[in-house]
Amino acid sequence: MLQKWNSNDISRRRFLQIAGLAGSIGALGGARAFGAEPSTFRLPFANGERELSRAFPQKGEMILLRTRPPLLETPFDVFDQGVFTPNNRFFVRWHLAYIPTQIDAASFRLVVRGKVGKTLSLSVEQLMKEFEPVELAAVNQCSGNSRGLFNPRVAGGQWANGAMGCARWTGVRLKDILDRAGVDAGAVQVRFNGLDSGVVPATPDFIKSLDIDHARDGEVMVAYGMNGEQLPLLNGFPLRLVVPGWYSTYWVKMLSDIEVLDKPDDNFWMAKAYLIPDTPHANVVPGQTGYKGVPINRMVPRSFFTNLRDGDAVLSGHAVQMRGIAFGGDTGVAKVLWSNDGGSHWKEAELEKDYGKYSFRRWHAHYTPKARGEDTLMVKAINSNGVEQPAAANWNPGGFMRNEIESVKVRVG
């Protein structure tokens, strides 16, 4: 449920200022751009060594997967710091290489057109002043989060588990914008486009669509705020779509154009890209063909340890604190279960404050190792619809929707 937002919480001036963001994203190349020797980080799969970069505007230290278009992964220790991922450590994923590096918020306009009663051209200031502001805590997760862990390996950005984040998004209901435009009776879908573009004209524009009923459900929003501040440039300034419970491919950044359609969208990014097998858990056997593909959509539940890593040392006979985060995917977290015997027995963890069904939920528990050696700790989430994380990983050629039960092995001394 979207919550009403108190506009006194955030200075309107901070949102409406002109964003003079220095630097050309395409020219940044990690720490070497500043004459320093870069530090590196190893992700937990083959060829997993990555540069840790501070070279991107408004971003702290991030795991660099690619410079242009930028793919920046959040170091996993950030998730141990709280429910909400700081803006300067929030992951970044762009599809097309040309991204504006400066946007004048005063002259920017969001156009609403197509099968509507009247075309709209809305400034950020109009969105803030003329529509009811709302706030929503929601997880934004790349469809290919954890792709690097697929076995056999698949093509695409080789993420570990950090292509996700949770924020408080502030903005207006998409429904309210569409209602002002007046949606025609024959409307079928709503299509969203941003300011990014390809280097060559033949590159398909990155556009995504939602069914009309979904677009008007009162939860989908057009956001101008993130964790009490304006959106960072690389996370979509000045506006981005927020589609709670759905993968971030639909969360169009630098949103500038909304078009209401009277037929299903058949553009490249809906008809050919981001398709998953129409099978349980989007799972197929490597090499399998002949299955139906459908656009990726709802997220599935996940949970993680955030304070323990493989190889950590613990003491026999002493209580060990375990903590982490979980989310229910397209609904809330009902419970988090943990095991210290490789999944033979499960116990319920303590859930911490609930910020809403689309948010991360922190959990904690304690266990006392009984003997020296190695313990395998496991964690799984069960969402409010009764869907729980599977014991075995799914596989598909896109590397999408991984949510296998997470585990860490600790050394007991």
Image (cartoon, rainbow, N blue to C red):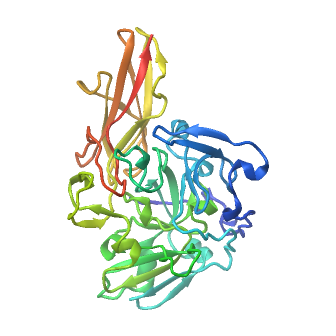
Whether residue 233 is visible to the viewer of this picture, yes or no, is yes
Name above or below for residue 311 compared with residue 183: above
Viewer-proximal residue, 266 or 298?
266
Q: Where residue 49 sits: x, y (%)?
A: 56, 41
Q: Where residue 43 sits: x, y (%)?
A: 51, 39
- Total labels drawn: 0
279 displayed left or right of 409: left
Q: Quadrant of residue 66?
A: bottom right
The residue shown at (37%, 50%) is 357
Q: Residue furthest front?
A: 287
Viewer-proximal residue, 270 or 87?
270
Q: Where residue 93 sits: x, y (%)?
A: 52, 59
Viewer-proximal residue, 276 or 189?
276
Where does the C terminus fall, quadrant-wise?
A: top left
Q: Residue furthest right?
A: 35
The residue shown at (43%, 17%) is 411
224 displayed left or right of 411: right
Q: Residue furthest bottom?
A: 117
Name above or below for residue 79 compared with residue 210: above
Q: Where residue 59 sits: x, y (%)?
A: 65, 52
Where does the N terminus fall, quadrant-wise?
A: bottom left
Q: Quadrant of residue 298?
A: bottom left
Whether residue 61 is visible to the viewer of this picture, yes or no, is no
Name above or below for residue 332 compared with residue 371: below
The residue shown at (36%, 9%) is 371
The residue shown at (57%, 78%) is 200
